[in-house]
Amino acid sequence: MASTIRRRARSPEVKNCTHKFDDAAEDPRLRFFGNVNIDTPSQNPDAVTLPLSSLLQHYTHLLFSTGCTVPLLHPALPPSAYCVPALSLVHWYTQHPSRSPTPPLDKISHVTLIGQGNVSLDIARMLLTPPSELAKYDVPTPVLDVLAQSAVEHVSIVGRRGPFQAAFTTKELREMMNLTDASMVSLDPAALEPSDGAALTRQQSRTLQLLQKGSKNKPGSTRKTWSLDFFRSPTGLVLPSEPASSVRPPAHLTLAHTMLDPSMRAVPTGETSTLPTSLVVTSLGHRAEPSAPWYDPALGHLRTLGGRVLDAAGRTVRNVYASGWAAVGARGVLAGTMMDAYAVADTILRDAFPGEDVKTVPVGDVDVGAGARTGGTEADGEDVLPRTAEGEGPPVEVEKAWREGRVTDYADWRAINAEEVRRGREKGKERERMAWEEARAFLAPR
């Protein structure tokens, strides 16, 4: 399930990724099992959780492409009813099986997002876009119903550094500028001055032009507004003492004003301010699950070299690999992750068939096999996998759960996908997403 709602035409990279998955999944040698968690229990009570050890006897090669699923929290902002990680909201509006709580948007007038990446802008768009516009895409109907009752009037997007260090892309910023019923609060011109006098990159120049031009709707012309609050760093959140009513009483977010030092780090200036807000959402990045084997807490992801997983002593774990965010951390976009996946696949093939010519798969004009993610060695490493697997099937726990309808295969996924598209067509939208309970009832009996 996608991590964010796509309210626009899918990019070529997304389509290419989807098509490649279809090509692989239709190969009779591949079996897909969904709703299975390894080591870490899922928030979905129907999910099957297995220890990694139960997999090892069944497979001779293992690839981790689990991403980074644990949100980073701000040390000054402990989770509460007034402070939640961005992933909680994203899981809610994508109807993720984790069953994240529905935010009380009918009682919230001001939302503050901590972090100025694409996820923050995506959440801001969800809160500020008219539900009638979202209805034609894949936003679930229960989510649209909540958004229709939303009392949110302003979204603050806070970052500790300036516009030239912000992590959002020009494309995402442009979509914010073009919101139908919201306008951006005017920026302080001083915030748009490069602090080090260095020449701007192409993306920085485009960002500057967009910020100088401002939103399509001029300040003061709309009821809903949003702001980019640069050079601000949270230091605490004071919760209200009065009980909640039809309108949630505001909390008070304390902010240290910052500036950039010569190494481009944000440092406090000594000045502070307070921002009344109804909800704080932290969007500060992610790390891998720390209980995962070969996790390196200093890195925040698995310890790897050239796509091969390393143990604590720096030895290669024979025939164990990792790709994408699981291997390199939560950075980069889909196209880069795809290129990395192709390169790691080539590494696996070279290790499995040494001396043979391994064909690479190009992405666009880039040949991702030649020289990509080289380094590391398969020899003389830790040995955790058998040389020959026991049988051809998955662990018995997976087979049993699949027969019970708790685990899905690729045919199930295709059936759910087709049904969501069909339901969406009836409502004049891209698709109508099913919650897990709906999907399971739809698939039963097998």
Image (spheres, rainbow, N blue to C red):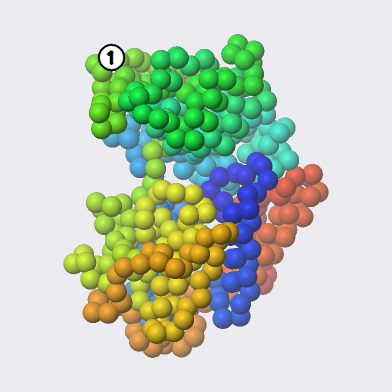
**Callout 1 amino acid:** Glu
The residue closer to the viewer here, 428 or 440, is 428
Q: Secondary structure at mark 1?
A: strand
Rendering quarter of residue 114: top left
Q: Residue at horizontal 28%, vertical 52%?
A: 299
Considering every residue shown, the one lying at the far top of the view is 220
Considering every residue shown, the one lying at the far front of the view is 199
Q: Position of residue 277 (x, y in %)?
A: 44, 20
Q: Residue at horizontal 26%, vertical 18%?
A: 269
The residue closer to the viewer here, 278 or 371, is 371
* Whether residue 407 can be seen here: no
Q: Position of residue 242 (x, y in %)?
A: 40, 17
Relative to residue 245, is residue 27 depicted above or below? below
* Whether residue 314 can be seen here: yes
Instruction: Say left or right for 85 vs 407.
Output: left
Image quadrant in which the C terminus is located: bottom right
Q: Residue at horizontal 44%, vertical 78%?
A: 349
The residue closer to the viewer here, 89 or 18, is 18
Rendering quarter of residue 429: top right
Q: Residues within 10 Å of mark 1 (few under 14, many from 20)?
A: few
Q: Residue at horizontal 31%, vertical 77%?
A: 378
Residue bearing the label numbered 1: 271
Image quadrant in which the N terminus is located: bottom right
